[in-house]
Amino acid sequence: MKHYHLALDLKNDPELIEAYDRHHRQVWPEVQQSILDSGIMRLELFRVHNRLFMILETTEAFSLEEKARQDARNPVVQKWETLMWDYQQSMPWAKKGEKWQLMRKICEIIA
């Protein structure tokens, strides 16, 4: 199993943030299915203020690049992504149009 940790910011507007949360309480079934079909076995999304943190647990065969290619070919996923972009904003260091930023592990403590 592989793990990915990603971060993204929402626009700093309480009404937009609440709307984003509402959408994620009822993620479209086709979007959920595209996630599962790609090899993502578990997706968790957390928020503090306007910062989002996503954890992906995936199969060994999973590839972020392949998931992006699949998403680009899926009109329902593209519609969802366009809608989500109304609430999201790129982080200051991101390239133009980039959304989620892959985080790198800097510490691990294991018993």
Image (spheres, rainbow, N blue to C red):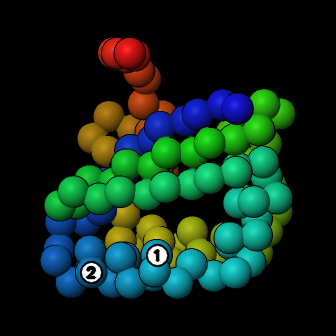
Where 59 sits versus 13, above or below? above
Screen quadrant of the C terminus: top left
Cα separation, mark 1 vs mark 2, equals: 10 Å
Above or below, comparing residue 65 to residue 40 in the picture: above
Horizontal side of residue 39 vs 46, given as left or right:
right
**Residue 90 visible in image:** no
Residue for badge 2? 18
Residue 95, image x and y in percent? 44, 38
Q: Which mark is residue 24?
A: 1
Q: On screen, 110 above or below 63?
A: above
User: Residue 26 or 68: which is nearer the viewer?
Assistant: 26
Residue at disc 1, secondary structure: helix
Q: In the image, what residue occupies the spot 77% across and 38% down?
A: 59
Element carrying mark 2: helix
Q: Please report the residue visible at 49 percent of the width from the left and 55 percent of the height from the top.
A: 44
Within-10-Å neighbours for mark 1: few <14, some 14–19, many 20+: few
User: Hey, what amino acid is under mark 1?
Assistant: His
| Residue 88 location (% of width, % of height) | 37, 63
